[in-house]
Amino acid sequence: MGFDVVVVGGGSAGCVLATRLSEDPGRTVLLIEAGPDYPDEDLLPPDVLDASQPTVDHDWGYSADADLDRGIQLPRARIMGGCSATNACFAQRGAPQDYDGWAELGILGWSFSDVLHDFRRLETDADFSDQWHGTHGPIPVQRHPRSDMNAIQAAFLDAAVAIGHRVVEDHNRPGEVGAGPSPRNVHNGVRMSSAITYLASARSRTNLTIQPDSVVAHVELSGTRATGVRLIDGTLIEADRVVLAAGTYGSPMILARAGIGAATELQALGITPVVDLPGVGSNLVDHALISIDLPASPSAGPSRFQNHLTFHSTSADRDGPPDLMMFPAGPFAVDSGVESGAVFGLVVGLMAPRSRGWVRLASDNPTDAPRIHPAHLTDATDFDRMIDGVVEARRIARSEPLAAVITGTELSPGPSIPSDDAQALARWVRGAVATFHHPVGTCAMGADPTLGAVTDAHGSVHGVDRLTIADASIMPTIPTGTTNLPTIMVAERIAHWLQSRATGDRA
Ligand SMILES: Cc1cc2nc3c(=O)[nH]c(=O)nc-3n(C[C@H](O)[C@H](O)[C@H](O)COP(=O)(O)OP(=O)(O)OC[C@H]3O[C@@H](n4cnc5c(N)ncnc54)[C@H](O)[C@@H]3O)c2cc1C
């Protein structure tokens, strides 16, 4: 027996899609997730509930190419809720210009004025109710009040303002640049994933089937029409429409194993190409991250992600979105090497990267991890802007009142690498850069497949019938904020388009 729709991947996007598409009791929906499902909040492991820091206990265990990217770890959740169930709960949108830029690429329906409706629809903002914010959506968003902030968080805000950054009360208000409390999708200390918000509200529906612990190998095709999916244990699941939401690394690999991808790459792996789409797996873009580490008293804790600063690099257009973000993380207790016993990071993210990498199949075996090249800072201007961020982090660390909370000399990069030693600092940055965990773009929307587009503006895969992608992979460029809410917005938008298709093409 087939389903009207099968949604592959129960992550940030997949839980939204399954929930919205099953609102019509006449549509049968199957949600398949590779990881486990904890259908009741009481059953969730404590680290998944605890919003104070990210967790990697339910993870695919991916790492980057060892030669190209030093084999850095690239966490991706494998659990119902996906990365929304494991992440740091920053609930940002990016800037209006990010989405207007998509529309300028010819991707119609994605300008900021188009997507604002979905950003409002997905949230209930506890602090603001105006034209920018939602008050009735499934995801609760709140900011930590000053009384909640630990000593490091409060001192970071005050130091940033003391050296000239603006105070920002609401980072999700368009045009705001500066330091202030982070909007976070947290309620009573619990991480508000798309599983315990959206999906929880739909679980009792008889037309929704939830199948955890099942890994999809590839899309099944009849000619160039999607007819279902094949699990790695060989099980065939038939459906009138397949919606991929397996994330930036998962979705392009499910396409490629079906023969949808760059024909020459597929042939080299012994996979027969069905639709030549050179963009599948290319255009990988991620926010690069680097941390300067400082010693602090363990008593400065315990909360870890409460505030952030946005600012422009020296080369950025000051009328454009801020291209750098900074936040304090920690303190984290350490066993040795630090007299005071705790370390915190001033973490800098490059939010408008130009570098582009890729994800590719390592083999035709669906249980093999993909090869991933995030290519952080390979663009020279990205590198220079990250250095700007590090220099600014050090300036804030030296400023009161934050300087008073730091209990000794900088641990990393450390005093032997001063900011005016450009070569030494550059060497350190190259060796320390990591992921901010926001990869997008590997099945990018666009009009022209020969120029790398994988889907059209509605997420429909070029050259394939009844196959849609609706997750972070279809973003053509990366938003200048963290990517969870933008991904949920993408899923809301595409679910709405799928819901309104004519009867007879119900999915
Ligand atoms: C450690 C960490 C911290 C982060 N912090 C933040 C933050 O604070 N704020 C923020 O906005 N963003 C953050 N992010 C990023 C954000 O969570 C992601 O951008 C977003 O969750 C992506 O959603 P998605 O639906 O595209 O993919 P995912 O949420 O990754 O969902 C994909 C799902 O598909 C499943 N899947 C994959 N392949 C298959 C297959 N073959 N068969 C079946 N199922 C499959 C996966 O198991 C997963 O559940 C963080 C990410 C990580 C990893």
Image: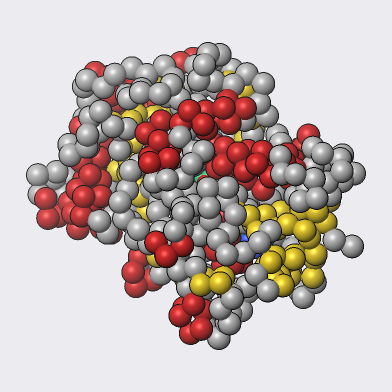
For image coordinates 39% across by 61% down, the residue present is: 451
Residue 175 quadrant: top left
Q: How is the image coloured?
A: secondary structure
Q: Is residue 441 above or below residue 272?
A: above
Q: Is residue 254 above or below residue 95?
A: below
Q: Is residue 265 above or below residue 375?
A: below
Tell whether 190 sits left or right of 267. Answer: right
Depth check: 203 or 107 in front? 107
Q: Is residue 6 above or below residue 90?
A: below
For image coordinates 48% across by 28% down, the residue present is: 113
Tell whether 238 sits left or right of 403. Answer: right
Depth check: 469 or 90 in front? 469
Determine if residue 298 is in view: no
For image coordinates 25% across by 33% down, the residue present is: 312
Tell whether 359 sits left or right of 30. Answer: left
Residue 423 point in image, percent of width and height: 12, 55
Residue 473 point in image, percent of width and height: 52, 53
Residue 335 point in image, percent of width and height: 44, 48
Residue 18 point in image, percent of width and height: 73, 45
For image coordinates 28% across by 55% down, the residue present is: 377
Determine if residue 109 is in view: yes
Depth check: 99 or 504 in front? 504
- Labels in figure, total: 0
Quarter containing the N terminus? bottom right
